[in-house]
Image (spheres, helix red, strand yellow):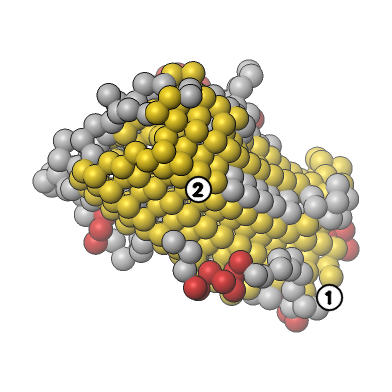
């Protein structure tokens, strides 16, 4: 499942510094009081570093900012106890044509943005904080007024958007309280994300809506390792686009060659989630990961309005110590729209879960829409204690259950 092209990524030591001079943002007028808006000062540091190449440094302290835009030959480094704090004014995030939910609406940019760059380096020991509570409150108020409102009706900034970049290394940082998605990779390749700690509220007075941990959108050759993710939506989402003609969209190439390893998941909708927008996803491996909260191991969202293929997904050597579901393979009807076209087809094939141990909530769901083809689905070498041990799969061609024990007994599908 792991392809040779991964080797260079797997063996790469993450470097967060570009060659050249360091450019502390305080040298350009940034003030670490958590109140002064430092967008212009930070962008000046980026512009200065771009002249000959260098590293923009955020030192210790709390620096409030709106959207900043990295440039070629510029890396970003957050020192220990540094906080890049997102403004809670939506006006501080420019509205531009950008990739969101598989399309390109005019929408707000992220707090940190990099576009069409080779050699993206972002890291350190500091924190990027989306300061998202007011954005969340506005969304939940709108959802209260209109339960059918879309995710995009209330503008909310992402924490970081990496757009059409190659040779990307992001490491070490804490991501907190994003207004929307945390890390969004669109049409990127040769990516290593390592050692991130991503959190958004999953309980309490107000939850963080749409706070996906990492969104791998139409990208390839991506390694995610040693990350900790607990959010109120998908932990790691593999995405493309949606709609009855999605497979003809040149802006949404396959998501392929994805490796997730040595990660710890708290709460969330899926250690690996395919969808909500997706066409072709293939060659995905998750290994040596652990779930400690109320999260799903594998979610495959099957949209009846979108042609989809999920192929060659392996999840192995997984430890479960939470209350979630093993599987959520099921129809996904959110904002269903055939746009006058005939219903397309979906295929799920070559899915393997093996070497899974621990205690969890339930098996969850394994079924598709009428006419979906689910085949070559394997469960093997699994030993679990489940609060609910019922397993009632839908129609699956070549479902293999080998050496699977639940609550001390051999598993039998009902």
> In the drawing, does residue 244 fall left or right of residue 117?
left
Residues 331 and 333: in front is 331
Extreme residue in the bottom direction: 52
In the picture, residue 413 is in which quadrant?
top left
- The residue indicated by pointer 2 is 316
In the picture, residue 252 is in which quadrant?
bottom left
Mark 2 falls on what kind of element? strand
Check residue 52 in the rendering and tell me which mark sits there, or answer none: none
Within 10 Å of disc 2 (Cα), the crowding (few <14, some 14-19, many 20+) is many
Residue located at (85% from left, 63% from top): 24
Image quadrant for the N terminus? bottom left
User: Is mark 1 in CB contact (under 8 Å) with mark 2?
Assistant: no
Image quadrant for the C terminus? top left
Residue 376 in view, yes or no: yes
Give residue 366's position: percent from left, percent from top.
Answer: 31, 34
Give residue 112's position: percent from left, percent from top.
Answer: 64, 55
Give residue 256's position: percent from left, percent from top.
Answer: 41, 61
> In the drawing, does residue 58 fall left or right of residue 397?
right
- The residue indicated by pointer 1 is 21
Task: First in sequence, mark 1 or 2: give its number.
Answer: 1
């Amino acid at each position: 499942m792991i392809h040779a092209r991964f080797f260079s990524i797997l063996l790469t030591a993450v470097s967060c510094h570009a060659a050249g001079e360091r450019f502390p943002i305080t040298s350009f007028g940034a003030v670490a009081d958590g109140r002064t808006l430092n967008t212009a000062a930070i962008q000046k540091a980026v512009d200065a570093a771009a002249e000959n190449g260098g590293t923009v440094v955020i030192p210790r302290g709390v620096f409030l900012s709106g959207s900043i835009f990295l440039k070629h030959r510029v890396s970003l480094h957050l020192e220990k106890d540094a906080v890049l704090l997102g403004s809670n004014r939506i006006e501080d995030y420019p509205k531009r044509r950008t990739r969101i939910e598989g399309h390109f609406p005019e929408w707000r940019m992220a707090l940190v943005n990099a576009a069409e760059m080779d050699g993206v380096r972002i890291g350190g020991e500091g924190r990027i904080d989306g300061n998202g509570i007011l954005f969340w409150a506005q969304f939940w108020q709108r959802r209260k007024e209109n339960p059918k409102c879309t995710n995009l009706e209330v503008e909310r900034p992402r924490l970081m958007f990496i757009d059409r970049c190659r040779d990307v290394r992001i490491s070490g940082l804490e991501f907190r309280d994003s207004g929307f998605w945390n890390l969004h990779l669109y049409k990127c390749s040769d990516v290593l994300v390592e050692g991130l700690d991503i959190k958004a509220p999953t309980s309490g007075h107000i939850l963080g809506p749409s706070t996906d941990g990492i969104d791998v959108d139409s990208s390839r050759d991506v390694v995610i390792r040693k990350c900790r993710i607990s959010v109120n939506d998908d932990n790691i989402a593999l995405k493309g686009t949606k709609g009855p003609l999605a497979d003809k969209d040149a802006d949404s190439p396959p998501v392929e060659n994805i490796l997730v390893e040595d990660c710890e998941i708290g709460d969330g909708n899926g250690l690996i989630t395919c969808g909500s927008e997706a066409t072709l996803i293939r060659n995905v491996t998750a290994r040596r990961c652990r779930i400690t909260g109320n999260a799903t191991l594998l979610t495959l969202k099957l949209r009846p309005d979108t042609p989809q293929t999920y192929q060659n997904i392996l999840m192995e050597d997984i430890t479960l110590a939470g209350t979630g579901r093993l599987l959520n393979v099921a129809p996904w009807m959110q904002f269903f729209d055939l746009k006058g076209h005939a219903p397309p087809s979906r295929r799920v094939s070559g899915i393997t879960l093996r070497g899974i141990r621990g205690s969890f909530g339930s098996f969850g769901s394994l079924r598709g829409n009428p006419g979906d083809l689910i085949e070559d689905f394997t469960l093997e070498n699994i030993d679990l204690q489940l609060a609910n041990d019922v397993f009632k799969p839908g129609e699956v061609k070549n479902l293999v259950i080998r050496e699977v024990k639940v609550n001390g007994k051999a598993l039998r599908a009902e």
